Image: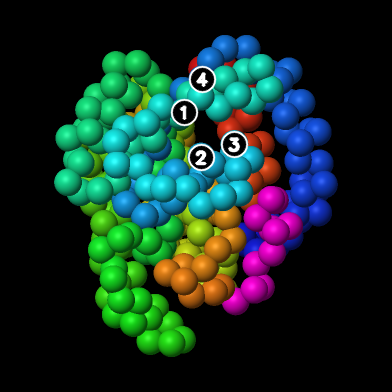
Amino acid sequence: MGWESFMVALGIEFADKFKKEIWAKIKISLKKKRKAVLFGCAGVGKSQFIASIQRSFERVKPTYFSRITQLLLDEFPLVIVDTPGHSALEKIRQDEMDNLIKEQKEVLINVVSYGYHERKDISNRNDIFDGEHFSYKFLQENRNDELKYLTQIKGKLQLSEVKWVITLVTKADIWWEEKAAVEAYYEQGRYAQEMQKIIQKSDFKHIIIPYCSIITPFYGIKTSGRFGEETKFAMQAHFLETLFDILGKKH
């Protein structure tokens, strides 16, 4: 089932039941504090992702230092370590990955966005947008940065006891009209090929999940309007359902 039909089905099933069913399952099944670590390039939406599962719908500021967030899922806390994505802060990321190995966190969430990285170093949006499409060079350079992150993660994961890696493809409201290409890239394309190299020498399960934290203009450019709140909430519900299943399993 493709991402589009999958999300339509989820929208019907989960949108109206989000709080009642998902939170109830988590409350019943989680019995101890769980930990996860977020990785990803600058501008992919890591901090906004955390805000979304905290049920905050405001724009948040980028993370320039490692930050620990306690997410209370009812009475059960989930600890997420949000790492900065800026290249100048690589040491912080490496330190957090070392901690990941030492503390044996269960879940690593690698946040990507198909090259739609929003950073402060773009001062003129006309340099990346021609009025109809975003620059192929801009998007491709950012996708290559996502692949570089996999290279950084590779050696660490081979030494860790991480059980699950989630590739979270954020900003679905921006790339939704390209969903077939996005799905193919992360499931069969270059990203998938590089991830498979890591999986072959590691002991974890990999899941790819499309996601939207907030529907908002990208560099001030409005989206098509064909991606709505119902689909956004369905994606968020699906992520939490998946996380519930992962953390509810006994390893």
Residue 203 found in image quarter: top left
Does residue 146 sit above or below 216 in this rendering? above
The amino acid pointed to by label 2 is: Ile
Residue 69 is marked as: 1
Residue 34 is marked as: 4
Colouring used for the render: rainbow
Query: Disc 2, disc 3: CB below 8 Å?
Result: yes
Mark nearest the camera among 2 and 4 is 2
Q: Which residues are magenta?
A: 224-234
- Give the side of residue 46 with respect to residue 123, left or right: right
Query: Disc 2, disc 4: CB below 8 Å?
Result: no
Taking depth in this image into account, of 61 and 233 the one nearest to the observer is 61
In primary-sequence order, the first of circles 2 and 4 is: 4
The amino acid pointed to by label 1 is: Thr
Q: Residues within 10 Å of mark 3 (few under 14, many from 20)?
A: some
Residue 109 found in image quarter: top left
Q: CA distance from mark 3 to mark 1?
A: 10 Å
* SS at circle 4: strand
Specify the farthest residue to the bottom: 131
User: Quadrant location of the N terminus?
Assistant: bottom right
Q: Residue at x 44, y 51 (%)?
A: 45
Query: Disc 4, disc 3: CB below 8 Å?
Result: no
Q: Provide residue 219's location: percent of width, then percent of height.
A: 42, 69
Mark nearest the camera among 4 and 1 is 1
The amino acid pointed to by label 4 is: Arg
Query: Disc 2, disc 1: CB below 8 Å?
Result: yes
Q: CA distance from mark 2 to mark 4?
A: 15 Å
Residue 50 is marked as: 2
In primary-sequence order, the first of circles 3 and 1 is: 3
Q: CA distance from mark 4 to mark 1?
A: 12 Å
Query: Which residue is label 3 attached to?
Result: 54
Q: CA distance from mark 2 to mark 1?
A: 8 Å
